[in-house]
């Protein structure tokens, strides 16, 4: 059986074992503190075929955004991402007229953006490294949550108002992944 290299993260919040496979080939296993090493090893061995299949599936895709999630990289692109987000939110909000509070740039591993109930729009710094169409989709997606705080048909109709090809862009983002 092939040995799998993985990063183990012990979490106080975890209730069960969770495997995450990233497009850069990283395998991360999150486990509760109570999980014993034997149990963890059995879990990885039991899922080896699935892990290898997922890793193989990522080989054809070259990530469009950098794989490293370093502080230096975040600092390098944060200002550029903020300027982009402010500019594009200003442009697209002319069509929507939503009230928002602040725009923040974050260093997140698994999210492109989020919208808080307080009206704060948060974006991953890596939007600065995406194609203009993909960055616009992410910005509009979060902006539209100010009008519909869900993913209902009404929400997607709002997105389609300014990004009519959102489905293709969304598919592309899911395929490329966030590394």
Image: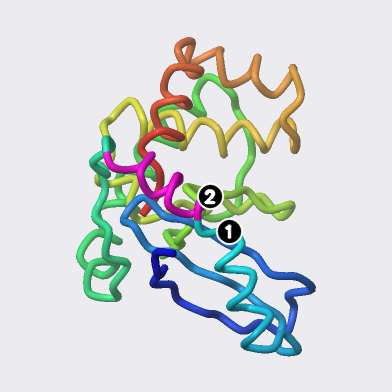
Residue 19 in the image: state x and y as whole percent: 58, 62
**Disc 2: CA contacts within 10 A as few (<14), some (14-19) or many (>=20):** few
User: Please, what is the dominant secondary structure of the magenta stretch?
Assistant: helix
Is 63 left or right of 177, judged from the image as shown? left
Residue located beneath label 1 in the image: 47
Is 48 left or right of 33, judged from the image as shown? left
In space, the residues marked 2 and 1 are separated at their CA atoms by 5 Å
* Secondary structure of the residue carrying numbered label 1: loop
Residue 135 in the image: state x and y as whole percent: 36, 35
Residue located beneath label 2 in the image: 50
Q: Quadrant of residue 58?
A: top left
Instruction: Indicate whether 136 appears above or below 110.
Output: above
* Secondary structure of the residue carrying numbered label 2: helix
Residue at 51% x, 48% y: name it. 113
Residue 116 in the image: state x and y as whole percent: 67, 53
Instruction: Indicate whether 9 appears above or below 160.
Output: below
**Disc 1: CA contacts within 10 A as few (<14), some (14-19) or many (>=20):** few
What span is in magenta? 49-59
Query: Front-most of 173 and 145?
Result: 173
Query: Residue 150's mark?
Result: none
Residue at 27% x, 65% y: name it. 68
């Amino acid at each position: 059986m092939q040995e799998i290299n993985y990063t183990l993260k012990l979490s106080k919040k975890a209730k069960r074992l969770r495997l995450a496979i990233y497009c850069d080939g990283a395998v991360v296993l999150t486990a509760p503190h109570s999980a014993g090493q034997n149990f963890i090893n059995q879990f990885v061995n039991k899922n080896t075929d699935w892990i290898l299949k997922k890793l193989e599936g990522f080989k054809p895709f070259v990530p469009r955004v950098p794989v490293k999630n370093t502080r230096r990289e975040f600092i390098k692109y944060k200002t550029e991402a903020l300027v982009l987000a402010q500019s594009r939110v200003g442009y697209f909000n002319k069509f929507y007229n939503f009230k928002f509070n602040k725009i923040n740039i974050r260093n997140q591993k698994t999210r492109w953006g989020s919208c808080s109930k307080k009206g704060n729009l948060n974006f991953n710094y890596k939007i600065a490294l995406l194609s203009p169409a993909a960055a616009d989709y992410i910005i509009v997606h979060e902006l539209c949550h100010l009008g519909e705080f869900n993913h209902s048909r009404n929400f997607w109709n709002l997105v389609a108002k300014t990004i009519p090809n959102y489905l293709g862009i969304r598919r592309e983002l899911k395929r490329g992944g966030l590394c």
